[in-house]
Image: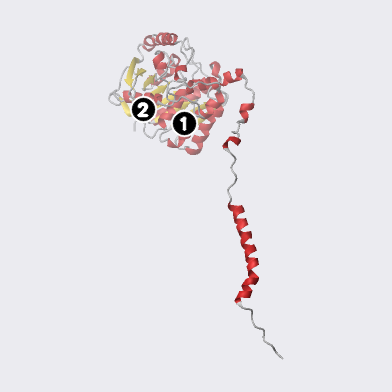
Amino acid sequence: MFVPIRPLSLRPRLALLLPALVVLAATVSTLAQTQQAPAVQQPAAAQAPRQNPRLQVPMDPDRARQLYVSKDPAHQSPGANFQRDVDARVAAEARYPELCKGIIDFQKVSYRSSVGDLDIPAYLFQPIAKQGPKAHAAMVWVHGGVHGNWGITMFPFVKEAVERGYVIIAPDYRGSIGYGEAYHKEIDYGGYEVDDVMSAAGYLATLPHVDPARVGIMGWSHGGYITLLSIFREKHPFAAGAAIVPVTNLIFRLSFKGPSYQWDFATQKRIQGLPFEKPDIYIARSPLYHVDKLQVPLLVHVATNDLDVNYVEDQQIVDALRSRKPDLAETKTYVDPPTWGQSGGHSFSRRVDPKTLQRVDSPDQIDSWNRTWTFFEWNLRKR
């Protein structure tokens, strides 16, 4: 006989499930506490500060002294003989009247920097016979040296420029030697000195026989560096520029040259530090990082045996110009040209006898100047 099975009532079923539910709830609670519980913090006193491993290395005082670089402006150019520099400049200037007699209109002039704080002395070389209003192209020629001044050994090239009809102005921008301690310590490498040099174009514009639309700029070494920074600005007065063996990358250069070279930069009052301390300043003052701003024709000559601006530095600007500004930049690398002085190929195109002030030509010097004259004659010609 079939006997139907009666379903269990709700109460008995709950009684059977209750123990299992209790166990499950306890397990879930334990897992949640394990995942969410914050890590146990050790008392502050129990945490030892992390030690810099380099502090555990014994320090060599002699090496530390060799590597030390001050950033105090009071330490700019220690041991400089400012009066000797003044005397040397005055003696060199005394030679110009006789050298220029009958062939060059020579004057020592000054103009106010656009910065507004200094009068900038400059050498002005002009043709004796002026051809008329705006008849002459002109150039600003920029001397080199971290602390340097316009050198009289550039005279044979100035003479050639004037014979070609150019008006040449050569400023002794802030930091130049031969003007006393205060002017010397106004040095502002890649900063206000660029404004000082560019302001020379403003002076040229006051001369009625100079065409302000046909003003170029040219420099060597540090002067080439200023040339690059000038024409890499968004606004400038120059129609063309030539930079010969120019400084190009201060971040690389200071590392490559070391503490003795770094000292002249770190102690400048508008820098006061090294690249790792003031990276923005050094990037802003390194032409390599501003190549894309070039808008006018540029000539660059470098030498592979340069012992001052070493080729590993200049190669950087040459490669950047060739790859990114091939339509505006004309570059040439001279392979181991005949050297001059202690800087090897750095002065390969400035070979001049300091006594006679005559060119001591080499094939590379002749080639470099021929290319330079052709470059400016084309780019500063009357339109």
Q: Nearer the viewer, residue 237 or 357?
A: 237
Q: Which of marks 1 and 2 is nearer the N terminus?
A: 2
Q: Position of residue 313 (x, y in %)?
A: 54, 28
The residue wearing badge 2 is: 215
Contact check, label 1 and label 2, Cβ < 8 Å? no
Query: Which residue is at a point 31% across and 18% down the rendered structure image?
Result: 129
Q: What residue type is labelled 2?
A: Val
Q: Where is residue 229 in the image (x, y as percent from the top left)?
A: 43, 29
> Number of marks in the image?
2
- Say what secondary structure mark 2 lies in: strand
Identify whether 90 is placed above or below 33: above
For the view shown, which residue lies furthest in the right direction?
1
Q: Does residue 237 appear left or right of residue 8 in this picture?
A: left
Q: Position of residue 265 (x, y in %)?
A: 48, 23
The residue wearing badge 1 is: 287
Q: Which of 45 and 301 is in front in this view?
A: 45
Quadrant of the image containing the C terminus: top left
Q: What colouring does the structure picture have?
A: secondary structure
Q: Nearer the viewer, mark 1 or mark 2?
A: 1
Identify whether 97 is placed above or below 67: above
> What is the C-alpha distance between the residues marked 1 and 2?
21 Å
Q: What residue type is labelled 1?
A: Pro
Sort mark 1 into few (<14), some (14-19) or many (20+) by Cα contacts within 10 Å: many
